[in-house]
């Protein structure tokens, strides 16, 4: 157990998805169970967003110039067609016109609940509404065939940044935090294989080149968020049916991406979240983070909370992490919206228990 005294309460971070029926329920449950332990609350990624980016497949079907590859529908969760998309032969990608992607509509609707509950004193006054957005590369890398990825990515990025602009126009900036979910990028950097397919990059073919491209994109994402809105990154090794797409050997790739973002981002990065595998309480995993120059104004959250081993396991991982990461809050490795709903309140309470013990 960590014994280093602290002068401020340890905060908890919720990555995004939470298995509750709607935004109102999410805001109420989080406020009841965590109270002042959180400084941001997401809406739980409820409704069509329940499985992260999968609902974007249906948006792609509405785009003239994008076509499915394969004649037979491939069902995913019986809701989505998992066949990949390709740019239609002879179609100029710059003429692609995406419909509403759903992120702005959801955020604006959820913020209405957030503002009402805050006015009623249910959500603490200091808490911001957190909107989690995928990286354009994550969506394109997941759903578009390799031959079309380079052409389609810039157009999808424009569409997603337009969603962000709508969110920024509708929600008061002092109430808002934007989180960029960065997962597919680590699959490329670690040469992960998912369902028999190796994740490859369309913008580079070496680790160094991919890293440069990932950081370049992350910098654009930071620049798209005004300075009076918090911006953060959820760095992720995937959550494919509650499992990583690859287990990191150590935190060196996380450290590389963080260092690049901290050096090159044109604004303060408000917070970052890093995963910590359940079995890694060893110095070797955390050691690369010792080389990161942590900005003073950036909150760090470590995903060291796992329901399988509770408070004891989280404190064991925290004790090792504290040797190289000076100050940090706590989180799970990823969202927990795809776990059973019966686990939700217990996980929220576990965050509180671990934070109190720290």
Image (cartoon, rainbow, N blue to C red):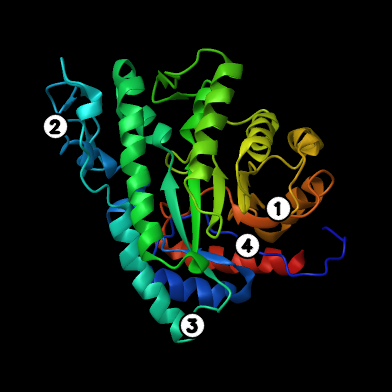
Residue highlighted by disc 3: 122
* Residue 246 makes an appearance in the image: no
Name the residue: 55% across, 60% down. Answer: 228
Residue highlighted by disc 4: 12
Relative placement, left or right, of 222 versus 9 is left
Relative placement, left or right, of 32 versus 337 is right
Categorize mark 4 by other alpha carbons within 10 Å: few (<14), some (14-19), many (20+): many
Q: Quadrant of residue 88?
A: top left
- Tell me the CA gap for discs 1 and 2: 50 Å
Q: Secondary structure at mark 4?
A: loop
Q: Which marked residue is nearer to the observer: mark 2 or mark 3? A: 2
Residue highlighted by disc 2: 64
Residue highlighted by disc 1: 313
Categorize mark 1 by other alpha carbons within 10 Å: few (<14), some (14-19), many (20+): many
Question: Considering only order in the chain, which callout, 4 or 2, is on the residue closer to the N terminus?
Answer: 4
Image: 50 above or below 174? above
Tag 2 and tag 4, C-beta contact below 8 Å: no
User: Which is more toward the observer, 260 or 67?
Assistant: 260
Categorize mark 3 by other alpha carbons within 10 Å: few (<14), some (14-19), many (20+): some
- Tell me the CA gap for discs 2 and 3: 45 Å
- Tell me the CA gap for discs 4 and 3: 18 Å
- Tell me the CA gap for discs 4 and 1: 16 Å
Categorize mark 2 by other alpha carbons within 10 Å: few (<14), some (14-19), many (20+): some
Which quadrant: the N terminus? bottom right
Residue 256: x and y in percent read: 67, 30
Q: Which marked residue is nearer to the observer: mark 2 or mark 4? A: 2
- Tell me the CA gap for discs 2 and 4: 43 Å
Q: Secondary structure at mark 3?
A: loop
């Amino acid at each position: 157990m960590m014994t280093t005294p602290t002068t401020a309460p340890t905060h908890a971070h919720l990555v995004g998805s939470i298995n509750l029926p709607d935004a109102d329920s999410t805001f109420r449950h989080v406020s009841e169970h965590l109270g002042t332990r959180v400084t941001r609350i997401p809406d739980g990624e409820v409704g069509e967003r329940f499985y992260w980016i999968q609902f974007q497949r249906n948006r792609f079907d509405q785009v003239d110039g994008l076509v499915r590859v394969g004649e037979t529908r491939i069902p995913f969760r019986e809701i989505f067609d998992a066949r990949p998309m390709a740019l239609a032969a002879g179609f100029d990608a710059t003429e692609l016109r995406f419909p509403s992607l759903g992120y702005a509509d959801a955020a604006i609707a959820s913020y209405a609940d957030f503002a009402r509950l805050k006015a009623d004193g249910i959500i603490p006054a200091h808490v911001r509404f957190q909107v989690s957005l995928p990286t354009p590369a994550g969506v394109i890398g997941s759903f578009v065939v390799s031959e079309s990825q380079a052409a389609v990515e810039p157009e999808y990025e424009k569409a997603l940044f337009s969603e962000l602009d709508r969110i920024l126009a509708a929600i008061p900036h002092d109430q808002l935090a934007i989180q960029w979910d960065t997962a597919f990028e680590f699959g490329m950097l670690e040469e992960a294989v998912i369902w028999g397919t190796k994740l490859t990059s369309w913008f580079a073919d070496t680790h160094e080149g991919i890293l440069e491209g990932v950081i370049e994109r992350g910098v654009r994402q930071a620049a798209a968020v005004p300075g009076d809105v918090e911006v953060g990154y959820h760095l992720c090794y995937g959550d494919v049916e509650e499992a990583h797409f690859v287990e990191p050997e150590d935190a060196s790739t996380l450290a590389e991406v963080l260092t690049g973002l901290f050096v090159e981002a044109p604004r303060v990065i408000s917070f970052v979240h890093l995963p910590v595998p359940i079995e890694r309480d060893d110095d070797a995993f955390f050691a690369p983070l010792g080389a990161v120059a942590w900005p003073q104004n950036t909150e760090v959250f470590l995903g060291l909370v796992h329901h399988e081993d509770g408070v004891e396991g989280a404190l064991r991982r925290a004790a090792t992490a504290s040797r190289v990461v000076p100050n940090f809050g706590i989180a799970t490795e990823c969202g927990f919206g795809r776990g059973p709903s019966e686990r939700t309140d217990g996980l929220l309470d576990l965050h509180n228990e671990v934070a109190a013990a720290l």
